[in-house]
């Protein structure tokens, strides 16, 4: 009787082989993961049977850092959360602090914050759409989106002095008022942006290759989306018509007319369409805010919260002392706690702050939408082919800066 021949174990597989299945790592150094994300994937052939998202490689301890500095000193650190929409993070943080202190900022400040948030939403979505197009194999859409984003960066630089890490919001108001002619420049951007957006839309939305690669891929049902805690465009893409700007209005969003974009099937294609429509609605809000921009001060009149104007500090001893106290000790925030959520481009960004009085928070907790998005990958990715993973990741539009914090 001849001895049965068995093939030797292929070199290099070792413990990665489980029966007929294979364990592979996608990332943490891979362009499809959009950052230092590691996906531990179990494959049956090229079909994903299990996915474990592994995060934390960008952890910087931001919540603990916040407990060792004044409220305004922490504002630049919020830039490093969703660094594609930094002013949204700035504003969400100071809104939470103002909620504890019972501060109602001026109408002019609210309008400016709305414009900043919506411009940041556009800037963030442009990066998301550009990267998504590249994940699907299209280079041209990336160049179109970044051409418009560069124009936004110029507007941010005119307003704040910085292109990316703006650090513009302050407790009780903003760092400075609007420069002369800045609103006119924003209006010019809005007028030329919509035709450019239509061109981007025509370029890829009906492209046969893009449609075939995204339709029916990465479907998230409304029930799944809510069970996993998804928010923002990813939740709306599943057909759930919820938007914090309408459901829990802040900054006077209830005074603006805009529509909530929702999807029908919850697939990767719907999430593209939702973000395209959100760009149009953001321009609609910005135009209304420019038309309604009220006169008056940008900061509240409270010397315990807001330092005096610079020219007064240089001329008056009392204002110099006041400035020294507010800057070194922080704004005088009473004891209390508050939670505030803002509808950011990536979803609902939440801040929980506990104050024991004074200018330094006792406890800060950040609810990052990208962390929730990546947690859901373990249910969304199984059942798809390996080649579908970059498409699904691109459609979810996450950023590791706020996921790991």
Image (spheres, grey):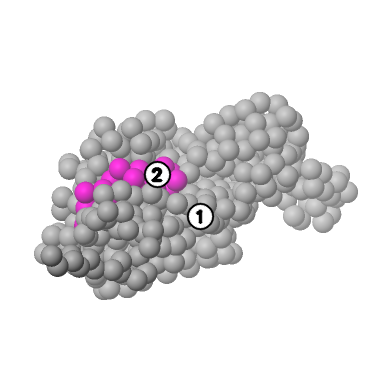
User: In the rendered image, which residue does mark 2 sit on?
Assistant: 375
Counting from the top left corner in percent of width and height, residue 386 is at: 25, 60
Pair 1/2: label in front: 2
Task: Pick whichever of labels 1 and 2 is earlier in the sequence.
Answer: 2
Q: Tag 2, which secondary structure?
A: helix
Separation of marks 1 and 2 at Cα, in angstroms: 15 Å
Image label count: 2
Counting from the top left corner in percent of width and height, residue 208 is at: 11, 64
Question: Per the image, is 372 magenta?
Answer: yes
Q: Residue at x 76, y 48 (%)?
A: 327
User: In the rendered image, which residue does mark 1 sit on?
Assistant: 401
Counting from the top left corner in percent of width and height, residue 392 is at: 28, 54
Task: For residue 129, say whether it is visible.
Answer: no
Please identify the quarter of the rendering in which residue 262 is found: top left
Q: Residue at x 50, y 39 (%)?
A: 367
Please identify the quarter of the rendering in which residue 210 is found: bottom left
The rendered magenta stretch, by its main secondary structure, is classed as helix
Is 130 in front, or is 330? 130
What stretch of residues is rendered in magenta?
A: 369-385
159 displayed left or right of 34? right
Is 369 in front, or is 358? 369
Q: Residue at x 30, y 66 (%)?
A: 9
16 displayed left or right of 117? left
Is 298 in front, or is 273? 273
Question: Per the image, is 374 magenta?
Answer: yes
């Amino acid at each position: 009787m001849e001895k049965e021949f068995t093939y030797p174990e292929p070199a290099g597989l070792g413990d990665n082989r489980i029966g007929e299945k294979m364990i592979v790592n996608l990332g943490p150094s891979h362009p499809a993961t959009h950052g230092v994300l590691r996906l531990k994937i179990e494959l049956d052939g090229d079909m994903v049977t299990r996915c474990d998202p592994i995060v934390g490689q960008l952890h910087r301890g931001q919540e603990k850092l916040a407990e060792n500095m004044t409220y305004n000193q922490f504002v630049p650190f919020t830039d490093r959360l969703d660094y594609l929409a930094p002013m949204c993070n700035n504003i969400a943080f100071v809104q939470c602090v103002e909620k504890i202190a019972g501060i109602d900022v001026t109408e002019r400040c609210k309008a400016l914050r709305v414009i900043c948030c919506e411009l940041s939403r556009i800037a963030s979505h442009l990066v998301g759409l550009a990267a998504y197009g590249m994940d699907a194999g299209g280079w041209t859409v990336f160049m179109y989106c970044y051409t418009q984003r560069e124009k936004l960066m110029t507007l941010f630089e005119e307003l704040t002095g910085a292109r990316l890490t703006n650090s513009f919001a302050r407790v009780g108001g903003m760092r400075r008022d609007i420069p002369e002619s800045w609103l006119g420049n924003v209006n010019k951007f809005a007028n030329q942006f919509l035709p450019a957006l239509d061109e981007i839309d025509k370029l890829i939305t009906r492209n046969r290759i893009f449609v075939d690669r995204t339709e029916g891929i990465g479907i998230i049902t409304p029930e799944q989306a809510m069970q996993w805690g998804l928010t923002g465009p990813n939740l709306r893409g599943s057909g759930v018509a919820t938007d914090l700007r309408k459901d829990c209005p802040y900054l006077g969003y209830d005074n603006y007319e805009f529509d909530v974009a929702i999807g029908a099937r919850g697939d990767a294609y719907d999430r593209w369409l939702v973000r395209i429509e959100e760009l149009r609605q953001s321009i609609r809000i910005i135009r209304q805010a420019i038309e309604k921009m009220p006169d008056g001060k940008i900061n509240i009149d409270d010397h315990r919260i807001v330092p005096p104007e610079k020219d007064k500090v240089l001329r008056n001893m009392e204002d110099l002392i006041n400035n020294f106290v507010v800057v070194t000790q922080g704004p005088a925030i009473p004891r209390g706690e508050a939670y505030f959520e803002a509808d950011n481009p990536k979803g609902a960004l939440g801040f929980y702050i506990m104050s024991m009085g004074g200018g330094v928070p006792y406890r800060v907790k950040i609810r990052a939408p990208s962390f929730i998005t990546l947690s859901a990958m373990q249910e969304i990715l199984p059942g798809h082919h390996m080649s579908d993973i970059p498409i699904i990741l691109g459609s979810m539009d996450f950023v590791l800066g706020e996921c790991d914090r």
